[in-house]
């Protein structure tokens, strides 16, 4: 009895880069989309709270992330647009868009962390509530939402870094249907047999004159 030993097929040299491109593409899409969603959600939540002294009493004050700073939400939208634009450009354009995506993530992290200790939004509210421009917020405290926004920015940054490292392996929008101005060759009219009615009908369907006139 003869035993047949299975010989593994050798892997092609392009298999490794192709697999890395697919994995990095999936990771970048997930990180970018999730990061932008987290940032936009976090900026709509309460970031800070405190009190203002009004007529001898304490008046509660709260501020959402969008009240504290609008930078994280704006950069999240820019990063999301850059993530989509990565597939519309190639070579140097793709590198530039990937860099924009990474910078959007880094800027989001910095703005969110800065907003975690900012009191200007509540100070403005305290001044309006007390009717005194010099009034400031008291008992100031911050929630965890600024740090959640920073995590979302970190995901955008990671997506940008993946695009910078592996973007050259990712597919681009097909130019199959794009016209480059090159004239297309005209089809030669097919020979029509006047004795065959089906040939006459097919010629008419093609917009040809079956009589050859």
Image (cartoon, helix red, strand yellow):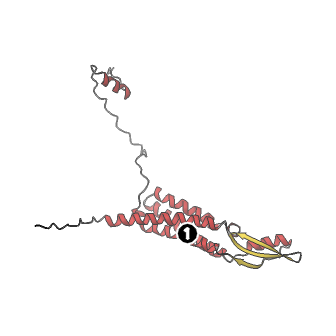
Judged from this view, the residue extending furthest toward the bottom is: 139
> Where the C terminus falls, by quadrant?
top left
Q: Point out residue 159 in the picture as x, y percentages from the top left corner.
A: 49, 67
Q: In the image, is 43 to the left or to the right of 175? A: right
Q: In the image, is 212 to the left or to the right of 116? A: left
Q: Point out residue 172 in the picture as x, y percentages from the top left corner.
A: 43, 56
Residue at the image position 47 percent from the left and 65 percent from the top? 28
Judged from this view, the residue extending furthest toward the left is: 1
Residue at the image position 86 percent from the left and 76 percent from the top? 57
Q: Point out residue 165 in the picture as x, y percentages from the top left corner.
A: 43, 69
Quick check: 159 above or below 114?
Answer: above
Foreground residue among 177 and 39: 39
Give the labeled residue for mark 1: 105
Quick check: 61 above or below 204?
Answer: below
Evaluate whether residue 116 shows in this view: yes
Local packing at callout 1 (Cα closer than 10 Å; few below 14, some 14-19, many 20+) is many
Judged from this view, the residue extending furthest toward the front is: 1
> Where the N terminus falls, by quadrant?
bottom left
| Secondary structure type for disc 1 | helix
Q: In the image, is 116 to the left or to the right of 176? A: right
Judged from this view, the residue extending furthest toward the right is: 55
Foreground residue among 7 and 179: 7
Q: Point out residue 85 in the picture as x, y percentages from the top left corner.
A: 50, 58
Number of numbered discs: 1
On the image, which quarter does residue 204 sit in? top left
Evaluate whether residue 69 shows in this view: no
On the image, which quarter does residue 193 sit in? top left
């Amino acid at each position: 009895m003869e035993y047949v030993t299975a010989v593994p097929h050798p892997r092609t040299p392009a298999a490794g880069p192709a697999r890395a491109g697919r994995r990095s593409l999936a990771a970048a899409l997930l990180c970018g989309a999730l990061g932008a969603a987290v940032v936009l959600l976090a900026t709509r939540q309460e970031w800070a709270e405190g009190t203002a002294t009004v007529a001898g009493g304490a008046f509660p004050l709260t501020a959402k992330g969008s009240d504290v700073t609008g930078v994280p939400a704006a950069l999240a939208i820019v990063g999301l647009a850059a993530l989509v634009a990565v597939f519309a450009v190639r070579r140097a354009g793709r590198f530039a868009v990937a860099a924009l995506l990474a910078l959007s993530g880094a800027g989001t992290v910095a703005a969110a962390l800065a907003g975690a200790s900012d009191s200007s939004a509540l100070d403005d509210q305290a001044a309006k509530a007390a009717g005194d421009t010099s009034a400031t917020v008291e008992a100031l405290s911050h929630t965890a939402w600024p740090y959640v926004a920073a995590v979302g920015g970190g995901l955008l940054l990671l997506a940008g870094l993946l695009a910078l490292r592996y973007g050259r392996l990712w597919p681009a929008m097909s130019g199959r249907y794009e016209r480059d101005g090159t004239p297309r060759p005209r089809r030669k009219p097919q020979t029509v047999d006047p004795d065959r009615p089906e040939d006459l009908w097919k010629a008419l369907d093609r917009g040809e004159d079956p009589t050859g006139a």
